[in-house]
Amino acid sequence: MVRDLLLRQIPILDFPGLEEKISPLCHRHGIQWVYPVKTSQIVVAQWVRLKCRYGCEHYNTNWCCPPATVTVKEAKEILREYKNALLLSGEADHPHFYRNNSKKRRTQVQFWKGTVAIERELFLLGYHKIFGLTPESCALCKKCAYPDNCLFPKEKRPSVESFSIDIFETLRRIGKEVKIAQHINDHFKHYSIILLE
């Protein structure tokens, strides 16, 4: 069973059997916690886009990273169309985080696919506006086809970071601890957000 899975405590997700549908997806994809959040608690900031543009090798090379994703202004406007969201989190040993190798890629893809799978399940339950924001940059392909057509358009989603979301301040606003993995043996936390309605 997923730790702290709060789906039954979210009035807008009060469907019989929902937890039984979502829990296996969370377990399979390394998602350990699901927190309900108000979109008013999600912080969008210019500095996040700055970090993407200066310091990330994926900038202008990936369909799920800037500048291929929405601007800071557009992200703020989109968030105003939603009231509720889910913050998904998973924790893993991740000694390959700063290395570009297949082990890191497997971890990224696992959590990415989990976010998209949960989004799809909730869409089928009637959340027609639902939209997932995934963790990190896309790793579905070893090398992104950008600027040519994406090879996985149905799974293509902007990352939380490329949506200019300040995950640190967002976590603080919902009362969660913020701790940066500083050493290669530290546990690494993945975060994704699913916009509900």
Image (spheres, helix red, strand yellow):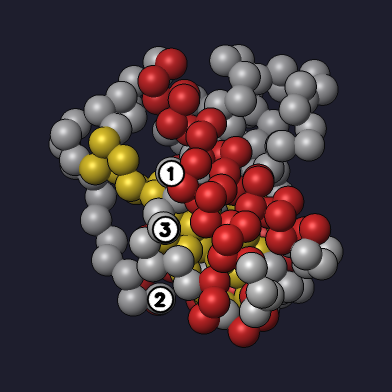
Taking depth in this image into account, of 79 and 105 the one nearest to the observer is 105
Provide the residue designation for mark 1.
Answer: 30
Residue type highlighted by circle 2: Ile
Distance of mark 1 from mark 2, alpha carbons?
22 Å
Q: For the C terminus, give its image quadrant.
A: bottom right
- Determine the residue positioned at 71% across, 55% down: 121
Which residue matches tag 2? 174
Counting other residues with Cα less than 10 Å from the Cα at mark 2, is it few (<14), some (14-19), or many (20 or more)?
A: some
Q: Could you say which quadrant of the image residue 12 lies in?
A: bottom right
- Give coordinates of residue 164: x percent, y percent: 56, 54
Residue 78, horizontal then vertical, whole percent: 73, 65
For marks 3 and 2, give the one nearer the viewer: 3
Instruction: Of the two numbered discs 3 and 1 on the same chain, state the one appearing first in sequence.
Output: 3
Near-viewer residue (15 or 192) = 15
If you read the primary sequence from the N terminus, does the residue marked by circle 1 or circle 2 appear first? 1
Q: Considering the numbered disc 2 on the image, is that residue within a helix, a strand or a loop?
A: loop
Identified at 30% across, 24% down, the residue is: 96
What number of labels is visible?
3
Front-most of residues 161 and 4: 4
